[in-house]
Amino acid sequence: MKGIRILVAEDEDKLREVILKYFKKEGYEGFGASDGEEALELWEEKKPDCVILDVMMPKMDGFEVLQEIRQTDNVPVIMLTARREEDDKIQGFEVGADDYVTKPFSPRELMVRIKALLKRSGVVTVENKLEVCGIHFNPEERVMTINDETIQLSQKEYDMLIYFINNQKLVLSREQILDRIWGFDYEGDSRVVDTSIKRLRKKLGEKGECIQTIRGLGYKFQK
């Protein structure tokens, strides 16, 4: 499967780079932002599977960024802070944070928290097996089964289904799917998305109904 995408919004350059290097070592794809506005831009562009937000950042703080994200996205979010005040943590959770890490911390601790959060949130990673909508996943072996029968999917079909699973209940436009699965530099016809989803649904049989068409908007995965 494609690497999990993680956005790291942290204004301390050295700390941000250390975290990103550790993520890369672990097989995760990381993107770095040095302020709140850049974080929002990257979130909109990359649609990450997890977001790490420093509370104190230039232009927009972590709370403001999270408020914007939570208007349309339920992506797992971990807040970073040098503060230990209880009010800060309460504010973060009220805005929609999923977890909190207080500085100083080790990249290993952060990675453990991320993996646990992704698992709780139903995000498919190589570390966890998952059953969604009657479809059983074993990402480590890249095996997908329905009623104990292995489903043979192409690379694009597999990546697309994982993308749907990791963004359950969110409407994904054709452009978002195209950019994520085919890449931003793809110059072909966007109708390839519709053709691929039609083929994917057929292979999934009755479970193909979990991929719903939202007229005029795109598609979403709904159990």
Image: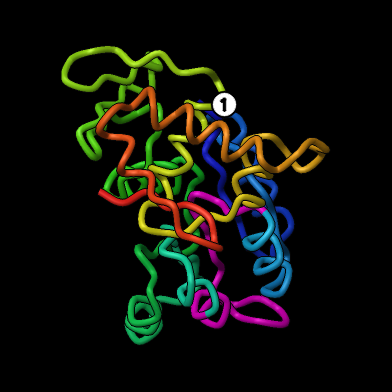
Residue 63 shown in magenta? yes
Q: Is residue 28 left or right of residue 214?
A: right
Report the amino acid beneath label 1.
Lys
The front one of 74 and 87 is 74
Q: Residue at x 16, y 20 (%)?
A: 147
Q: Residue at x 47, y 54 (%)?
A: 105
Q: Is residue 146 left or right of residue 80?
A: left
Quarter residue 165 falls in = top left
Quarter residue 22 falls in = top right
Asked if 10 appears above or below 178 in the picture, the reply is: below
Q: Residue at x 38, y 36 (%)?
A: 124
Residue where numbered disc 1 is placed: 156
Quarter residue 183 falls in = top right
Most extreme residue toward the left is: 147
Percent x, y of residue 11? 69, 66
Percent x, y of residue 187? 83, 38
Residue 1 shown in magenta? no
The front one of 49 and 180 is 180
Percent x, y of residue 45? 69, 57
Q: Residue at x 67, y 74 (%)?
A: 36
The front one of 156 and 166 is 156
- Residue at disc 1, secondary structure: helix
Q: How is the image coloured?
A: rainbow
Query: Magenta residues?
Result: 46-67
The front one of 47 and 38 is 47
Percent x, y of residue 140? 38, 19
Q: Is residue 209 left or right of residue 200?
A: left
Label 1, residues with CA under 10 Å away: few <14, some 14-19, many ≥20: some
* Number of dots carrying numbers: 1
